[in-house]
Amino acid sequence: MVKAVTFLLFLALLFTFSQAKSIVPQPQQFRSFKINNTQNVKSCSYTVSITTSCSSTKYTRDQISLAFGDAYGNQVYAPRLDDPSTGTFERCSRDTFLILGPCSYQICYVYLYRSGFDGWMPEKVTIYGYNTKSATFYYNTYIPNDVWYGFNLCNGASVSTM
């Protein structure tokens, strides 16, 4: 009986003092993010699918922009994806966009920019490129106003801050 109590006490202490760390990346603010010059080159097409969370506001009139790229400085920028008159970014919806930009290697970062008062919660963003595997980034949180917000999974490579 003493051994069982000691073992249970040991397990209780182990669970109390252990710190679980999420291995699922979470989106972050990137205040110093800048659009770079490669975004003007339009030689490849990308299909971007954005799913709006069922927990989002019913619709948004906010301005939504997108930037994504690879670890080598190739960046694709879409300054305005929103169009309230067509129901873009309504709750529980999926919107698909064809975006032209420079050819890239594997997409490893994506940032969304929201400007407005309604608020908006994307569930996920999936990017399909010509010569790359699809890349999916899971948000499931409201995008803050007037700041680039997203993921940089480029393993230490530099994303444009100039």
Image (cartoon, rainbow, N blue to C red):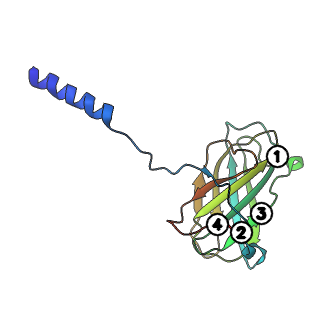
User: Residue 99: horizontal and vertical position, in percent?
Assistant: 76, 67
Near mark 1 (Cα within 10 A), the count class, few <14, some 14-19 or many ≥20, is many
Near mark 3 (Cα within 10 A), the count class, few <14, some 14-19 or many ≥20, is some
* Circle 1 or circle 4, nearest the eye: 1
Numbered mark located on residue 128 in the image: 4
Local secondary structure at mark 3: strand
* Nearer-N-terminus badge (1/4): 1
- Who's the residue at 77% across and 47% down the image? 89
- The residue wearing badge 1 is 62
Q: In the rendered view, would you say 17 is above or below 148?
A: above
The reply to whether dot 4 and dot 3 touch (C-beta < 8 Å) is no
- Who's the residue at 20% across and 30% down the image? 10
- Pick the quarter of the image with the C terminus: bottom right
- Between the C-alphas of marks 2 and 1, the distance is 21 Å
Q: What amino acid is found at the position of numbered circle 4 in the picture? A: Tyr
The reply to whether dot 3 and dot 2 touch (C-beta < 8 Å) is yes
- Between the C-alphas of marks 4 and 3, the distance is 15 Å
Q: What amino acid is found at the position of numbered circle 1 in the picture? A: Asp
The reply to whether dot 1 and dot 4 touch (C-beta < 8 Å) is no
Local secondary structure at mark 1: loop
- Who's the residue at 68% across and 70% down the image? 75
- Between the C-alphas of marks 3 and 2, the distance is 7 Å
- Pick the quarter of the image with the N terminus: top left
Q: In which quarter of the view is residue 117 placed?
A: top right
Q: What amino acid is found at the position of numbered circle 2 in the picture? A: Val
* Nearer-N-terminus badge (1/3): 1
- The residue wearing badge 2 is 76
- The residue wearing badge 3 is 78
Q: How many marks?
A: 4
Q: What amino acid is found at the position of numbered circle 3 in the picture? A: Ala
